Image (cartoon, rainbow, N blue to C red):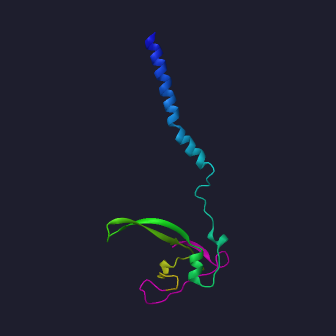
Amino acid sequence: MKHKKISKFLTIILTVAMVMSFMPVIATTTAYAAHQGNVWRDPAENWMTAAGRTRELDLNANLTYETQYCHSCHDNMLFLVFRVPEFTRSGETALNRGVLFSDGIMIDGVNRGNLDDGLPGVNAFYTGYH
């Protein structure tokens, strides 16, 4: 009889402990219920124009912090990355045409290429982030 009471008591304690272990998972799940997820928004809808192309790219950039391994100090370093949505008239990215910088300088660092840029949502197509 005493063995059954101890067994019931241990069963209740284990059941309560197991239910309590699920509580953080339930709280985390309900916190994400209001999260919209990975919803893509067209950058052309909120595109801000500016006096110069470089300033315009800075205004419309998404800023992210990323880590990268530094070969000089042999440590992972944190750095700021500007991700700018690219819009071109032809729909082909600038890198595919050999243009590396926003002022038209090509990969060789000497020549200037065609930026093929336009106004988002008017005469240019979204090609990705660069």
The outermost residue toward the top is 1
Is residue 128 within the magenta segment? yes
* 29 sits left or right of 73 in the view: right
Nearer the observer, 123 or 120: 120
* 48 sits left or right of 69 in the view: right
- Dominant secondary-structure state across the stretch colored magenta: loop
Count up the numbered dots.
0
Q: Position of residue 107 (x, y in %)?
A: 43, 83
Nearer the observer, 34 or 80: 80
Q: Position of residue 98 (x, y in %)?
A: 46, 82
Nearer the observer, 109 or 69: 69
Residue at horizontal 53 percent and vertical 42 percent from the top = 25
Q: Position of residue 73 (x, y in %)?
A: 32, 69
- Where 111 sits versus 10, above or below? below
Is residue 79 within the magenta segment? no
Residue at horizontal 62 percent and vertical 81 percent from the top = 118
Q: Is residue 63 visible?
A: yes
The outermost residue toward the bottom is 111
- Where 7 sits versus 14, above or below? above
Q: Which residues are magenta?
A: 105-130
Q: Is residue 90 visible?
A: no
Dividing the picture into quadrants, the one containing residue 46 is: bottom right
Residue at horizontal 58 percent and vertical 83 percent from the top = 53
- Where 77 sits versus 15, above or below? below
